[in-house]
Image: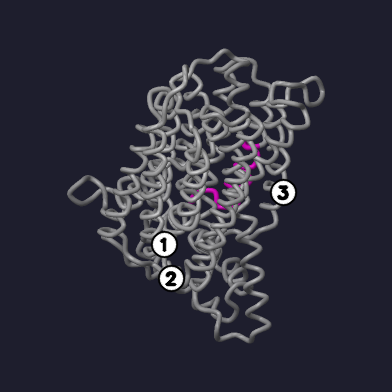
Amino acid sequence: MSELRTVPRHQRQQQTSRVTLIAVVAALGGFLFGFDTAVINGAVASVQRAFSAGPFVLGLSVSAALIGSAVGAWFAGSLADRFGRVRMMIGAAVIFFVSAFGTGIANAIWDFSIWRFIGGVAVGVASVVSPAYIAEVAPASMRGRLGSLQQLAIVTGIFIALLSDYAIATIAGSPDDIFALNAPAWRWMFWAEMIPAAAYGLLALLIPESPRYLVARGRNDEAEGILQTIIGEEAPGKVAEIQKTLATERRSRLGDLVGGRFGLLPIVWTGIILSVFQQFVGINVIFYYSSVLWHAVGFSESSSLAITVITSVINILTTFIAISLIDHVGRRPLLLVGSAGMTVTLGTLALIFGTAPLNSAGQPILNGATGPIALVAANLFVVFFGFSWGPVVWVLLGEMFPNRIRAIALSVAAAAQWIANFIVSTTFPPLQSASLGLAYGLYTASAILSFLFVLRFIRETKGKELEQMEYLE
């Protein structure tokens, strides 16, 4: 959308405030996305004990939400084009609420896994609809910052989930002890998600539909009215611009992504590979399993949960760095710096875990300075991810695709991200049992490859209008 500099300052401030509030509400889907995927961290050991699950079955149950996320992401784009972005947000909120309740009442590992899968569907929908909606309502000059709200919401959701896990477990005594209504604390960890799910659904009722969706449906007057509140007098011209691009388009389908030497359009492969690398560096191992990881290498259960909460705070703070820099520095430089930093920090963890002596359970013992060094390296890894690959990938996925394929290409890229997340999360328990050094060595290799990929294939999108987006074709 057009720049806001031509309007009076007070009007520009009003427009900026309105579009920011709209983006914040949309980003609540990201908050639930983060909460739902991270809440398992404080409960995973209790779930294993309650249902007598082995490492492989436990990994599958934790990762069931990620398969659901891939399914939700795969269909979200076409459904959002059919029913609208706001309706999909409301639907996702309902699914989040139902899943949170069901997960808390699960009586067996298969039952638990099904409810996690259902919650994952909502996560997948939110991972597609929220960034697409924000990209479509945000002016070009603000799109990077507002798009970064998605990642800020995700990491805030992770933090609140881990903080509530810690608080509930601390009040109860442990995740296995009774918290309230004769139910153990770990069940309440999941039920806590019902509160933000309800808030998301109610607030989504108050935000306008995407102007681009409305124009596609022939509701030009509604679209112009919404644009008036965002870009003022330039709204009629923007509607005409959207109409012009839509005139050459038809409803996108998977066949539209086919082309090139490798089956898909180059830009689609770029989105898929970006998504895969964001997960293959192992970031979600930190947020799904870190309490188990730090406990395994010698920290107490309480200290492990506290370390995880501190890590999530660091993740939030570094996201603000991305928000402040992304529209000034650009997307590509942040990705390159992030990849370099992740390579060094992950390599440090691989070296420490790979050379440490092992205890009777085959887990490394961090003696002397190795424990503090590992903690610092892990948190610096989160810092480098938090201002780069975390927010920037979501911004790019929301803006990099041509309009004619944006929704469905974003769905495919997000689905690939969740499949990659599933692979990493499912393989970590067996890798942890085999060798933590090997696990972090693989994540280090991914960080190196991510740097080379950005250097070769990523082009800058800073300041470009969606209706004029030219990228790798």
Viewed as shown, does residue 89 lie left or right of 362? right
Q: Compare marks 1 and 3 and give the one earlier in the sequence.
A: 3
Q: Residues within 10 Å of mark 2 (few under 14, many from 20)?
A: few
The amino acid type of the residue labelled 2 equals: Val
* Residue 423 screen position, x and y as percent: 39, 32
Badge number at residue 329: 2
The amino acid type of the residue labelled 3 equals: Leu
* Residue 171 screen position, x and y as percent: 78, 31
Instruction: Work out whether residue 430 or residue 21 is closer to the camera in this orientation and state it.
Output: 430
* Residue 193 screen position, x and y as percent: 68, 37
Q: Are marks 2 and 1 in contact (CB under 8 Å)?
A: yes
* Rendered image quadrant of residue 456: bottom left
The quarter in which the C terminus is drawn is: bottom left
Residue 92 forms part of the magenta stretch? yes
| Residue sticking out furthest to the front | 368
Q: Which residue is mark 1?
A: 334
The amino acid type of the residue labelled 1 equals: Leu
Q: Which residue is mark 3?
A: 202
What residue range appears in magenta? 81-96
Viewed as shown, does residue 365 lie left or right of 301? left
CA separation, marks 2 and 1?
8 Å
Q: Nearer the viewer, mark 3 or mark 2?
A: 2
The secondary structure type at the circle numbered 3 is helix
